Amino acid sequence: MKHQLIRVLLPGPLRQHFDYLLDTQLDPVLNGDPLLSASQASIDDSAATPHQVKLIGLRVLAPFGRGKRTGIITALPDSTDCPPEKLKFAQLIDSQPAMTDSLQRLCLWAANYYHHPAGDVLFHALPILLRKGQPNQLPQTIHWQLTERGKKVSLNVVKRAKKQLEVMQQLHNLMQQEQPDSPVSQTIDEQLLRPAGQSRQPLLALEEKGWIESIERPAALDLPEEAPSSALTLSEEQQFAVDSINAKTQSEDKDKGHFAAFLLEGVTGSGKTEVYLQAIETVVAQGKQALVLVPEIGLTPQTLQRFRARFRQPVVVLHSGLTDTARLRAWQAASNGEAAVIIGTRSAIFTPMQSPGLIIVDEEHDNSYKQMEGFRYHARDLAVVRARMEKVPVVLGSATPALESLHNANTDRYQLLKLTHRASDAKEPTKILLDIRSCHLNAGLSPTMRDKIRRTLESNQQVLLFLNRRGFSPVLMCHDCGWLAQCPSCDAKMALHQNPHRLHCHHCDNQRRLPETCPDCKSENMVPVGLGTERLEQELAQTFDDWPVLRVDRDSTRKKGSLDKILQQINAGEPMILLGTQMLAKGHHFPKVTLVGILDVDGAFFSGDFRAGEKLAQLVTQVAGRAGRGELAGEVCLQSRQPEHPQLQGLLKQGYNSWAQQELELREQALLPPFSHMAMLRAEAINADSAKKILQPMADCLKQISSGSLMQMGPLAAPMEKRANRYRQQLLIQADDRRSLHQAMAILLNQPWLQPANSRYRWSIDIDPQDLY
DNA sequence: AGCACGCCGACT
DNA sequence: GTCGGCGTGCTC
Ligand SMILES: [Zn+2]
Ligand SMILES: [Zn+2]
């Protein structure tokens, strides 16, 4: 067969596929007939023809409209609907699939589940360089290895040339480490032998002597220099957890593990990471790979170091801070099996693995796993789907599991593994509610709180204060007439910032100078109203002027490296006040902090979203875990105007899990997730009416096709209707079971009258929305 | 998404 | 008379 028909998906919002022809004789990538060779048939797919095995997953360069695009082959159809005169030839880019079968299956599953165009999903899963059609080759660098003569030469001969000796020592060490099953190669990347611009001279001299030679090889991954650190002794609970996971990763028939989902619910400091590490060791020892997902900011150098220090095999990282080249390199290492452990944030769930063995999702409750625009997937949920497809176990770990996950554990879809003891025997911090209704607040602090802060500082310990409001004050008001600084583009007040001295809208990034006089009454009496982190910082510095105050929020950490610097200062351990937004609550441990204050509990609790309580409970529990480790007992104080609120009381008295179980009962009564399922349709346009006109026909259509099995709310104006000069409407769909919701949405999206989103009328679909606005 | 084509208002 | 606004439709 000379002209193979291929079905291709292209990036972009197009919901269709496109068929092309492939010239199997002339395509330069195929030079010869690998298509027909039986040896190309993969082991796991005996039913497929050799063609399918070989071509599916390869990228092509395809003529499209007036230009060319990168596409991915997803099928080899026998015939096509496309009229023959339109059918064009595409050219192969890859000789090896850029995407494994199972990964492509995951993408297509996700595209279907989230109702997002498949081509877009597929390309989302690829590193940017591959999206652009760059070759999927390992970047080659120069490596050095010993020649046969070089292996025999005594190091004494060269001991006078210090640099040369170092090189020879490194290469000889490598030779001695040689083990049959070890992945350690016998060559060293020149970049490692000659760090940061040192001379090549020693290398050339050794080459001249005939002791070493250079070869081109894929660039080195960072490998640990030291012997791996040893495993820690496990508690009984930890051991049980590790054994349970191992039971699924180890199996008689070597090749295949088993799917199983575990919820590892471990209080802060109970050693979840050690459980991960030991479970991974089992997997890596079988030559398989582990994928570890971490929250956006959870990838601290300490955590990474801990993983790197544990394994002889390469540990690669995939996060948003990498350059395109570095990201491709890590992705390739995962894909070709060089990397044994892959650690990454949300999008790393799409990393291909040569031989997957285990998937871990750390801090599985974290919101950063849900993408909030474009392709709105949830990486934790996809992790479970992927684990099932790859037939490997998945471990979801958290001190404060999402209610969805707890519900899955309650209903035996997940196996619950509990770690109830803090490893270091540290005492549970005490939690106190401070009633701020009847007392005078100064700098947002009740007298009791101020008192506690002072005492903590005086005993040389650190204080951590949470205030989830950036800037100096959330509002600027005219004292005389009540005028408020409003954002011209949003239905929101502009926040006052000190540095630079500006009004700033947090919703659209609008910035402007402060008016010197009130625009309405010309009064000069403009007053900041409310408390933000900048203002709190100032006032704390005055009140507690013997101690430093460190502010950690998006504004104070904007510059690269400044967060690290602040964290270093904190870890130096001097008594001080740390004050910050949510940023501080995640991932960091502050052993010297013994007092934690949460200043605006109520704001979070009554925000209208049904998940607000869950978010707050998680925050409180997470920060409580940060306070006091070792011998110092911690204390957590919550300021509230509703201290008698039963939810709040329950959380403090009984802890997260029993709070969560009660909350689950409430959700069940109210038929809220996880006892029902939601989809949110959002639309925005230049005026409120057009936005509504996008959603109204959708609402009508859904009403018709659902025959009462769906509940609809809307279309309604979003809680903040105008944002960045666009008016926003939303339509919330709720159903008892997933299937009818999914079907209804699929039918809706198939309606011919439905026009795709464009720059004028934007709309989007969000399955399992995280926020209801 | 891009990109062309095409049809109306307002400018040298 | 043209220039350019963006609505509409197509891309294998
Ligand atoms: Zn005024
Ligand atoms: Zn704004």
Image (spheres, coloured by chain):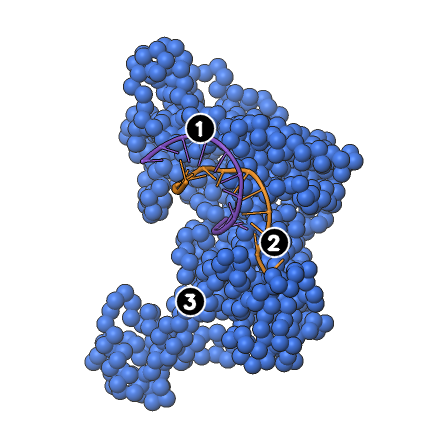
Chain colours: A blue, B purple, C orange
Which residue corresponds to mark 3?
A: A221
Whether the residue under disc 1 has CB within 8 Å of ligand 2: yes
Which residue corresponds to mark 1?
A: A489
Q: Nearer the viewer, residue A471 or A42?
A: A42
Marks 3 and 2, how far apart at CA: 32 Å
Residue found at x 37% / y 88%: A148
- Left/right of residue A489 with respect to residue A546 in the rendered view: right
Q: Nearer the viewer, residue A543 or A126?
A: A126
Could you say where residue A518 lies in the image, as x and y percent from the top left? 34, 15
The circle drawn on residue A118 is 2
- Left/right of residue A542 with respect to residue A299 in the rendered view: left
Question: Amino acid type of disc 1?
Answer: Ser
Q: Nearer the viewer, residue A289 or A550?
A: A289
Tell which subunit mark 3 falls on. Answer: A
Question: Amino acid type of disc 2?
Answer: Ala
Could you say where residue A92 lies in the image, as x and y percent from the top left? 53, 69
Quarter of the C terminus of chain A within the rendering: top right
Marks 2 and 1, how far apart at CA: 34 Å
